[in-house]
Image (spheres, helix red, strand yellow):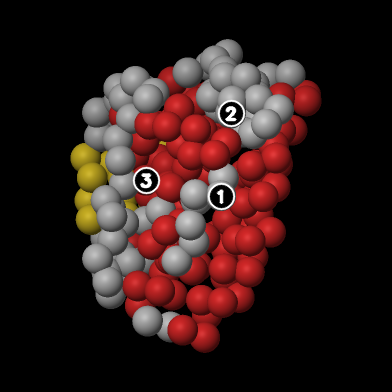
Amino acid sequence: MTRRLYGIPLSGHVHRVRLFLSILKLDYDFVEASMQSPEILRLNPLGQIPFFEDGNVLLTDSNAILVYLAKTYAPDSHWLPEDPLGAAHVQKWFSIAAGELRYGPAMARGATRRNYPEEIAPAQAKAAKLLPFMESELTKRPFLAANQPTLADLSCYAYTARAPEGGISLQPYPNIRKWLDAVEALPGFVSMPHAPAGNI
């Protein structure tokens, strides 16, 4: 069976899948492809990355890919709780990753590196609401959704860790910084590259 992951190394969406594949010790080929590349548009007309192939399985959406990997290669594990409340907590953070995180820290990072100043302040304002919420949630438990790592942590890690690239300091948030350290200490952890200006 051939596994392929399409995307770019500097994408937090792509990184969360690469991170879980590494944690699960699953071999795969990485195909570097941007959102508007002919290869991606052929595979996914919506032009979204990552795109994942696992034999005959073809998947888009990073969080959907995480769920597939957990259900297929780590069933009944802590990564995706089966109990209703645990599953709901993970889903909540999936929504935050696709909403406040994407349009806050992630957008501030992209706008800063691409020199789109008109987009920076609104994104930083969204981050200023999100990060205190995350900080408060992490006073209750060491990880976002549970007392052990789940897919929620993998979904939210990269864009939070790279928030300073968007001019957003993490110094006021000791619980977030401790959580980032905990994710980075997971066996199999792989880092997302830091983005040079103009290359996000």
Q: Looking at the image, which residue is at 24% across and 28% down?
A: 27
- Label of residue 15 in the image: 3
Which of pointers 1 and 3 indicates the residue nearer the eye? 1
Which of pointers 1 and 2 indicates the residue nearer the eye? 1
**Mark 3, secondary structure of its residue:** helix
Q: Looking at the image, which residue is at 31% across and 47% down?
A: 192
- Determine which residue is flagged by label 2: 143
Q: Quadrant of the C terminus?
A: bottom left
Residue 34 vertical position relative to residue 95 in the rendered view, above or below: below
**Residue type highlighted by circle 3:** His
Q: Looking at the image, which residue is at 53% across and 24% down?
A: 149
Q: Position of residue 116 (x, y in %)?
A: 43, 83
Q: Quadrant of the N terminus?
A: top left
Left or right, 155 with respect to 136, comes to left
**Mark 1, secondary structure of its residue:** loop
Q: Nearer the viewer, residue 54 or 112?
A: 112
Q: Where is residue 170 in the image (x, y as percent from the top left)?
A: 50, 51
Considering every residue shown, the one lying at the far front of the view is: 172
The answer to whether mark 1 and mark 3 are in CB contact below 8 A is no
Left or right, 193 with respect to 146, comes to left
**Residue type highlighted by circle 1:** Pro
Marked residue nearer the N-terminal end (3 or 2): 3
